[in-house]
Amino acid sequence: MEMQRPALIFEHSPLFIIVCILAGLAYAYVQYQKSGPWGQSLNRILFVARALLVSVIAMLLVSPILKQVKNVIEEPTYVIAVDNSSSIARSTDSTRLRTLYSSINDLVELKKEEGYAIDIRTIDGESHEKIPSDVKLDYSQSDLAGFLDQISADYEGRNLSGALLVSDGIFNEGISPTFTDYNYNIDVLGVGDTIPKADVSIRSVVYNKISYQGNQFPVVVQFTQKGFEGRNVNVAISQGSKVIESKTVGLKSDHQLNEIRFLVEASEKGFQRYTVRITPLANEFTTINNTKQVYVEVIEGTENIAVVAAAPHPDIKALRFAIESNSNYTFDQFIYSLPADRARLANTTKQYDLIIFHQLPDRRGVGAINPKMLEGVAQLFIYGESTDIRFFNEINEVLTLDAVPGEYDKVTASFNQEFMNFKLSEGLQQTFTELPPINVPFGKIDLSKGTKVMLYQQVGSIVTTKPLIALNEEITPKKAVVLGDGLWKWRLTSFVNNESHEQFNELITKPVQFLSSKDDRRKFKAYPIKNESTTNEAVVFDSEVYNDLYERVYGNRINLTVTDSEGKARNFTFITNENNTRYTISGLPEGIYNYSASTNLNGSLESVSGEFLVKDLQVEDINLTADFDLLRELSAKNGGQFYLDDELEDLKNNNLPAQGIIHSSEQYLPFINIKWLFF
């Protein structure tokens, strides 16, 4: 840093300084015109000192400003960006790489001698003083564009002279780095092998991540080959040591996509690991990309929804289509006026997650609701002309209706913006104004404690405070009421306006999902925030602890055990606080893990358990052929040059002198900042 000589600036005319000096002399003259008890020499010294002091004090009253200019020289920075993804280790000799990294470190020292600041970073986000000879080439993905973008962001507005990218040009994440213009020069050092090798490689495996127990799910294997056209290969899918199915397929021409399909039965619940493997052929360059892991979460069946109605009604069909649009639900219907349905309902042993009662209880005595049917099952009541008001009020627990018999209002719907249990899409909310009115009972409505209104009744353009759809989650089981029938009209109109049933399906399935889902009222919960993570991600656990009033409490010691599929356990302990209830575990290898967590709450041991998955992306094994054409285009586009690994000396000899940037700043300080004057 350099500082120029300070300069004085005056707010008033500098002629005032003469006045200040005269004032000092006058003041000293009055004080020392007569000699004191001391000698004449001392009297003169005191005269000069007093005159100087008074003059300076008077000058300070004139408020002079001290102007200082600071010059800061920012030395240039040169970034060494090293791609340490695993594709480089797969295709490049390790001894050759160590020699290369040693030569790059020599380049680093040369740059430092020339006045450059050096920033060495790897694609996994780590920084280094120099490139380690044993740098880990194990990063599971290559986002070259993101790597270079991060350098741009970090050095925005700073003196970045350029960068050297050491890479094989293979990217499998983000966009191509040639699509972006970077604001700095990029030299590129190409590593790896550009000659395609004879190889069979699984490109992808397509499958559903979730399947229901007892169902079958497809697994589609897509793979390519180079150098084995017309040969036959065996493709198999297995679970553990058991081969589920295998097929033989003839290979198509080089780089053309081959595809084979398996159908697997989901027999056990939980995370299941399957292995897809292509039997290696003779002279394959690598067999690592012949195998891929498939992870499927098998869940214990779908949720069962039933509609029980007094009589046939078009609403029932509309409800059925909406509910069955979600593959997570099964739908059964029972019509009391049909003897076969009554018998089927009486004999059913199926456990339902939600029962929808359409115009039941019925005032005509067609059928009565069996109390056993309601034990522990969420309920939705749809009011209609045949509903018995007295029994309806006794059983629904959501609201009390005091209606005038035979009198109805025609209303549309308006979403309650303060309803927070779930949201309806903007498109659906706007659709309400286009829907035809439906009949609702005319009368007084009192909401029960804990009831929340989802839709209000709207008469014409006036939104009333009366509910059209209301829910109560504070009672167990949860219940809801729709105060009107004729929903089938909404389904038809919505389709006419939007050429889709999507919005009507949303109106039905969101309340159904809310009601049928089970509340977790445990006092202690611990769980991974993601059921699936990759090997280069940390697994983060969150925890919740509640007291008897179900208020959140902190400071509990939590013991966490994570066990892999081979039975190896890892134990962790952490204490929650109000600002952090999470715990992070890094470095877990690929596999299915079980976890158990426990804490002591009021002298009682509370525990939870579950499982999660850590997957290896395996994308680095798909393509092992270096792309130097991409790297040449990247360097040419960004003012740099492309070098092969044996041309590093040319790069050393192509150095430009380090150019610093001078940053100047001006400071305006009070005169008192002159240190000698201050003291």
Image: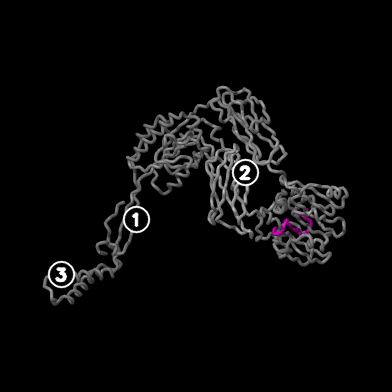
Q: Are marks 3 and 1 in contact (CB under 8 Å)?
A: no
Q: Return the residue nearer the eye: 563 or 652.
A: 563
Quadrant in the picture for residue 9: bottom left
- Quadrant assignment for the C terminus: bottom left
Q: Earlier in the sequence, mark 2 or mark 3?
A: 3
Q: Secondary structure at mark 3?
A: helix
* Circle count: 3
Looking at numbered disc 3 in the image, what kind of residue is underneath it? Ile
Residue under label 1: 665
**Residue 535 vertical placement versus 522 (above, below):** above
Q: Look at the image and tell me whether residue 174 can be seen.
A: no
x and y percent of residue 138 in the render? 50, 36
x and y percent of residue 664 in the render? 34, 53
Distance from disc 3 to disc 1, alpha carbons, whole Å, reads 42 Å
Q: Position of 393 compared to 85: left or right?
A: right
Distance from disc 2 to disc 1, alpha carbons, whole Å, reads 59 Å
Residue under label 3: 45
How packed is label 3: few (under 14 Cα within 10 Å), some, or many (20 or more)? few
Q: Look at the image and tell me whether residue 590 can be seen.
A: yes
- Residue 611: which numbered mark, if any? 2
Q: Secondary structure at mark 1?
A: strand
Mark 3 vs mark 1: in front: 3
**Residue positioned 81% across, 49% down in the render:** 333
Mark 2 vs mark 1: in front: 2
The magenta stretch spans which residues? 473-490
